[in-house]
Image (spheres, grey):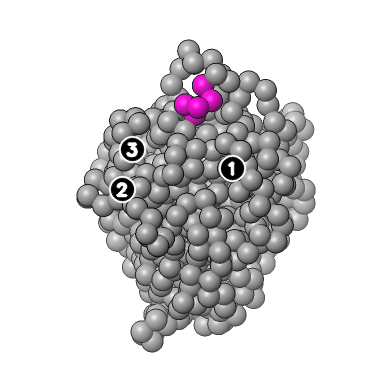
Amino acid sequence: MGNEKHLHPLMLAGTGSDVGKSIVATAFCRIFLQDGYHPAPFKAQNMALNSFATPEGLEIGRAQAVQAEAAGIPCHTDMNPLLLKPQSDHTSQVVLNGKPIGSKNAYDYWRRGEGRDDNGTTIDFRKEVCAAFDRLACRYNPIVMEGAGSILEINLRDTDLVNLPMARHAGADVILVGDIDRGGVFASVYGSIALQTKQDQQLIKGIIINKFRGDMRLFDSGRRMLEEICGVPVLGVIPYYKNIHIEEEDSVALAQKSMALEQGKVNVAVIMLQHLSNYTDFDALEQDSRIHLFYTNNVSDIQKADIIILPGTKSTLHDLYELRRNGCAQAIASAARGGTTVLGICGGYQMMGVEVCDPDHVEGDISRLPGLGLLPVTTTLSGEKVTRQVSCSLATSLQNLSSLHGYEIHMGKTLPFGDAKASPLLLLEDGNEDGYMVSPHCMGTYVHGILDNQSFVDFILEPFKEKFNTQEKTFDYQAFKERQYDLLAEHVRRHVDMERIYRILRGEDC
């Protein structure tokens, strides 16, 4: 390991959801890397639609893939052994050690803390996540653990796999993260500690107040009060930031992104689906100075866009039905006929075809729906999931694009419809073909992350080059992300007591 001194695992737990646990954990992954350690992220159980494919072709939550990138290591399923992908208000697809094992009812899952795979084999989820942590802890130092939701769901204490029971197994030092921006931080921090068992209270070694706005000096007395009533030191107060861009785990803020069209830029509309997934596909586009990107399901906005992107979805048929109901399907088809570029990714690619069929009812009761008819392909959904990282090149001779990279996570197979001839968009490194292209204005692909490749973005922007300054610098998204991790680490390091945190992790400050 880069630094010989062994550190305890560090768990970032929260007073609630969306308090910034994932971002703070990402910052610590980069800080430890900068300080000569060999860190790795870990979240026993994650609930998210935004997932990623590991180099082995297995599936984990996107947040842990981002944290691994900040730590400078390849992502692995041991970093997120249990992933729940919501399918409805009551059911989720359960992904264990990177592979789906079936859909589970939320009540049964939380009541029992165990489940059965599709073959009827009983699975002890606690045993599985603890084993994953143990494997990871043998390879990295320190492990940066992330809790889930609130640290204090006392009604679920017996079946909790991810918060303090996991910290106990790991021998982790817990730092409680509270969000001051949403209000009520004193009550939420105090209550989160006071209602723990005496044993679990001993695990909580510090408090970090996140998302502070205004003059930091105004919180000096509040900091002292928190330490007095909680008996736990406040290790930092992290100010709210706006100019650091880290891929988000949750899609809550997508609808709030600007929808006003901008002159002098290529206006890209991403269709806001009810079950939209892998929205990080568009993070690179958001940072490209030539592009104004917005999310919408408004018909008039769709018709004004230069490029329309149909994104991935966890429920292709449900979202296709909704697009037809709300008029978006007709607006997209009309815009395509008028020359607007339309690109479909994964589920969006499936929707662009002639039909989507689900004979085995993988997604629900609907057996078949007509697609948008923009691509001459048919899709049949199946229970078998394809999960892998891919390298590829553009299949068309219009432009020689090689060394493109991305990943696939999808259920279903798409083939030319009727007597339509194959017209792949991409040629994969293993010799297979992917996607379909009618023209540079109408195409679809199963490859997530294709828009992280600058050369592919240049390809789809080529018809609009008169709208922007062609002398602008080429945007390097990977270099941009590395810079953002460094900026985040610098921001957090400046506002937390790293010296004391190291003492805690070395067992010198109890």
First of labels 1, 2 by sequence position: 1
Indicate whether 101 appears above or below 315: below
Say if residue 498 shows up in the picture. no
| Residue positioned 47% across, 26% down in the render | 462
Name the residue tied to disc 3: 396
Q: Nearer the viewer, mark 2 or mark 3?
A: 3
Disc ID at residue 390: 2
Q: Nearer the viewer, residue 51 or 222?
A: 51
Which stretch did the figure color magenta?
A: 461-465
Indicate whether 496 appears above or below 232: above
Amino acid under label 2? Val
Magenta region, main secondary structure: helix
SS class, disc 3 = loop
Name the residue tied to disc 1: 337
Q: Nearer the viewer, residue 208 or 67?
A: 67
Between the C-alphas of marks 1 and 2, the distance is 32 Å
Between the C-alphas of marks 1 and 3, the distance is 22 Å
Residue, far front: 419
First of labels 2, 3 by sequence position: 2
Q: Nearer the viewer, residue 284 or 416?
A: 416
Between the C-alphas of marks 2 and 3, the distance is 18 Å
Quadrant holding the N terminus: top left
